[in-house]
Image: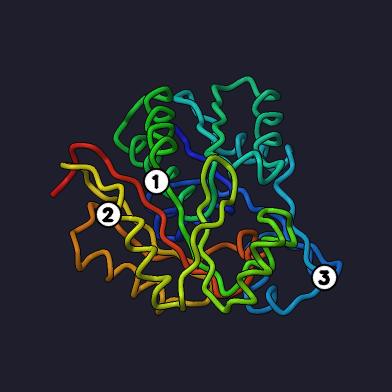
Amino acid sequence: MTVAVVTDSAAALPAEFVERYGVTVVPMWITVGGRTTRDGETTLEVMLEAEDLETSGPSPGDFASAIEQRATDDGILVLTIASTMSSTYQSAVLAADQTTGRVRVVDTQTAAGAEALVVLAAARAAASGAALDAVAAAAEEVISRVRLVATVPDLSYLARSGRVPELAAHVGRKLGVAPLFEFVAGGVHPLRPALGLDAAYDRLVHHVMSNREEGAGLHLAAYHALRPEAADALLHGVERLLTPASAFVGEFGSVMVAHTGPGLVGLAWWWEPGAGR
């Protein structure tokens, strides 16, 4: 047996990694027009056309079921979306408190591609036979290093959800620029906008390279909302400068897109000391 890894669907972990590492994904909930479905059961195309849209995290019961199914003497690590963004962490903690097994719940303090990178680090540690404390430590190391930077056509959705000031969204719309933002320490922070999407994509690549560590290996995820060609271009933009230790393209989950709007494209990454090529 190995340590079991459980996460929520806000991580948008690609199916190939879910299957390869046996990660259990507890779905978030999406309500469109009064109809509630699990994250992933409503396509992004349908969701983005909806005017009446709400999202919610898994319940304690959802997590309790997942924990029960993955019960193992080696323990379970549950990794959640930032507690500042959702009640998901609190639900996982309540579920863990109700079990007699060894369960550790960790707030990743991030979401989407960055959360996926945290989950992957933990899953790889678990697959190597590491004990629960070591698997949790692997996740926490990435949490301290991971970054997520993205661009959207405008900041209207983020302003509507209260995650960026309305003034920032208004200025962006008025000037016709491509807004950029960073998700860090559980919050969304606007960055200096770019003059057009091409410039925005160049800026994203620059952010990755700007905090490069000598001798470190890059773990990279390019994410998109119905813009696979843009995510591919971003990944290739980084690969023209170096060879990542690991890299993949994924699609932002419904919950993330519900708060950021359509056209979202971004990069998540962390530099692993001593793993450079």
Q: CA distance from mark 2 to mark 3?
A: 38 Å
Determine the image quadrant of residue 179.
bottom right
Q: Nearer the viewer, mark 1 or mark 3?
A: 3
Task: Name the residue: 82% across, 67% down.
Answer: 35
Classify mark 1: helix, strand or loop.
helix
Badge 2 vs badge 3, beta-carbon distance below 8 Å: no
- Amino acid of disc 2: Ser
Badge 1 vs badge 3, beta-carbon distance below 8 Å: no
Badge 2 vs badge 1, beta-carbon distance below 8 Å: yes
Q: Is residue 90 above or below residue 252?
A: above
- Lower sequence index among marks 2 and 1: 1
> Residue 120's mark?
1
Q: Looking at the rendering, in which quadrant would you find the N terminus?
A: top left
- Amino acid of disc 3: Asp
Q: CA distance from mark 1 to mark 3?
A: 34 Å
Task: Name the residue: 59% across, 48% down.
Answer: 8
Q: Is residue 98 left or right of residue 111?
A: right
Q: Residues within 10 Å of mark 2 (few under 14, many from 20)?
A: few
Q: Residues within 10 Å of mark 3 (few under 14, many from 20)?
A: few
Q: CA distance from mark 2 to mark 1?
A: 11 Å
> Residue 52's mark?
3
Q: Which percent across, then down, holds residue 77? A: 50, 32
Q: Which percent across, then down, holds residue 51? A: 80, 74
Q: Which residue is mark 2?
A: 246
Residue placed most toward the observer, 191 or 139: 191
Determine the image quadrant of residue 94.
top right
Q: Is residue 129 above or below residue 84?
A: above
Residue placed most toward the observer, 35 or 19: 35
Task: Name the residue: 54% across, 40% down.
Answer: 185
- Amino acid of disc 1: Leu
Classify mark 2: helix, strand or loop.
strand
